Image: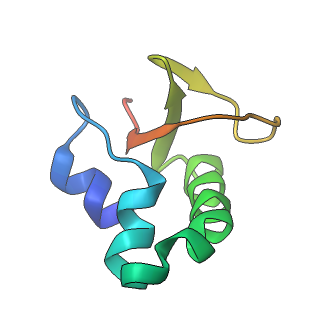
Amino acid sequence: MLALAELRGPDSSTCPSDAARAIGGENWRELMDEARRIARELAKSGQVEITQRGEVLDPDTAWRGPVRIRTARH
């Protein structure tokens, strides 16, 4: 997931499902909970930001719906 976000750069983003698809192939949906967990960990460490509708989300709060991952803007 971090590699995908870095590839896109800070002005673009990727979806957690992109990482799940890269690893899981046809069974990618089974990996979505894990992909979101990893996204939270990366956000907590400051490596990425989780966004929704362009707003940065707090990784420690509950969020629902589609999110995007981008490298952290410092």
Give the side of residue 14 with respect to residue 41, left or right. left
Q: How many marks?
A: 0
Q: Is residue 46 left or right of residue 9?
A: right
Residue 59 position in % (x across, y down): 70, 41
The location of residue 21, given as percent across then percent down, is 37, 71
Residue drawn where x is 55% and y is 69% of the image:
29
Residue 65, quarter of picture: top right
Out of 62 and 11, give the one closest to the viewer.
Answer: 62
Residue 56 location, x and y as percent?
55, 23
Q: Position of residue 41 (x, y in %)?
A: 64, 59
Residue drawn at x 58%, y 74% is: 31
13 on left or right of 47: left
Colour scheme shown: rainbow
Rendered view: 2 above or below 54 = below
Seen at 46% across and 46% down, the residue is 48
Residue found farthest to the front: 26
In which quadrant will I find the N terminus?
A: bottom left
Residue at 24% x, 54% y: name it. 6
Q: Answer with left or right where residue 50 lies relative to residue 33.
A: left
* Image quadrant containing the C terminus: top left
Q: In this picture, is 21 found above or below 66?
A: below
Q: Camera-side residue: 24 or 9? A: 24
When the figure is inspected, residue 25 is found, relative to residue 57, above or below; the finding is below
Q: Is residue 68 above or below residue 74?
A: below
Q: Nearer the viewer, residue 68 or 42?
A: 68
